[in-house]
Image (cartoon, helix red, strand yellow):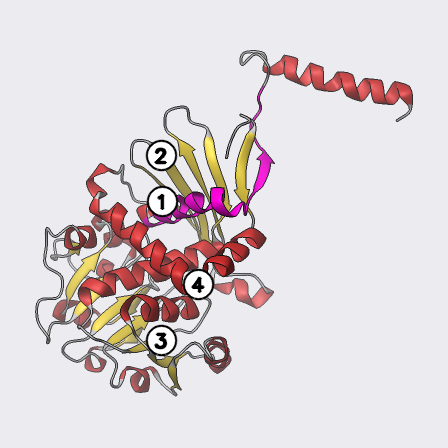
Amino acid sequence: MQQKLNIVPFVSVQNMMKLVLATGVERFLTDLAGYIEEDFRRWEMFNKAPRVASHSADGVIELMPTSDGETYGFKYVNGHPKNTRSGRQTVTAFGVLADVGNGYPILLTEMTILTALRTAAMSAVAAKYLAPKGARTMAMIGNGAQSEFQAIAFKAILGVDRLRLYDIDSSATRRCVNNVAGMGFDVTACASSQEAVEGAEIVTTVTADKQYAKILTDNMVGPGIHINAIGGDCPGKTELHRDILLRSDIFVEYKPQTRIEGEIQQIDPDHPVIELWQVIAGKAPGRTDERQITLFDSVGFAIEDFSALRYVRDQLRETGLYEELDLLADPDEPRDLFGMILRAAKPAAVMQQTGA
């Protein structure tokens, strides 16, 4: 796929949408979930570190790097909750894969759409191990850009087909209802978060405001529920009342990062939590009984993005849904970079002389 040293395959937003549609959204999510599980099973092979974050009063800009020793990947991502007021996305992203052996990039891709897909796939993978068996009803509190992806992933991977939706912005709920119409869901638009959780076996919280919030209070959470808390992703931003955490068995992606950014920033730093990879790899139990409250305190981690990047790259040879980006300087003699500039000036001078 990559023959010229100056060329890096680039997946634009347009080509990402074409790839998702050509694959089918449900199959894309199911296949991507498989890649995530595969990489979580080899978790110990990866170089891991909390993401590098630059916080401001308006939001956060982050870099999320990791490597499995052969391939390096990173994602640039922002989170700016106020952006929607000016017609911008709350979250935008792009990502890179590179060959560890020579350092050359082998993929550059949009990741705004891809992040929404990988977040949904990750949530469904966690619920596969933590949610009640046979669960079909999910409450979703927060019906923004992530909501439809979550719904489709849970349906494709777990068979969840009943949705109870609530958002403080009722237009967001109406949009979500319209977008999933005809996809096999029984959808109820609710007037409050309390109403939304009634009868739900899974509760997904996916709100954007950067504050210590209590989207779920302790009295709303009964025995046997699985909570998929994915809205928290930075210090000072939570969605759950602290008492819920104290009643739950908590599962996280990467402890050092989640202690800073997740729901567990509210509790003692030595409070026991389990990293999800241990459950997937069979080294720790997930759900153990029907009355257990399980909490996936998800803030997103670089290995999930690595899985998504790896999945997209594997699809490119067959689909051809990429552009060749002239990104890397490739002089005839590797040490003669300035000479490359001089040689580029000669054709320009000839064109000026000929009047072309």
Q: Secondary structure at mark 3?
A: strand
Front disc: 1 or 4: 4
Q: Which residues are magenta?
A: 304-330
Tag 2: residue type?
Answer: Thr
Can you say whether 69 is above or below 191 in the image? above
The residue closer to the viewer here, 107 or 227, is 107
Question: Which disc is residue 71 wearing?
Answer: 2
Rounded to the nearest whole Å, what is the CA distance between mark 1 and mark 4? 19 Å
Rounded to the nearest whole Å, what is the CA distance between mark 2 and mark 3? 37 Å
Q: Secondary structure at mark 1?
A: helix
Question: Which disc is residue 141 wearing?
Answer: 3
Rounded to the nearest whole Å, what is the CA distance between mark 1 and mark 2? 9 Å
Residue 326 part of the magenta segment: yes
Q: Which residue is mark 4?
A: 25
Image quadrant for the C terminus? top right
Front disc: 4 or 2: 4
Query: Between disc 2 and disc 3, whose residue precedes?
Result: 2
Query: Between disc 4 and disc 3, whose residue precedes?
Result: 4
Q: Are marks 1 and 2 in contact (CB under 8 Å)?
A: yes
Q: Residue at x 71, y 19 (%)?
A: 344
Tag 3: residue type?
Answer: Ile
Residue 350 part of the magenta segment: no
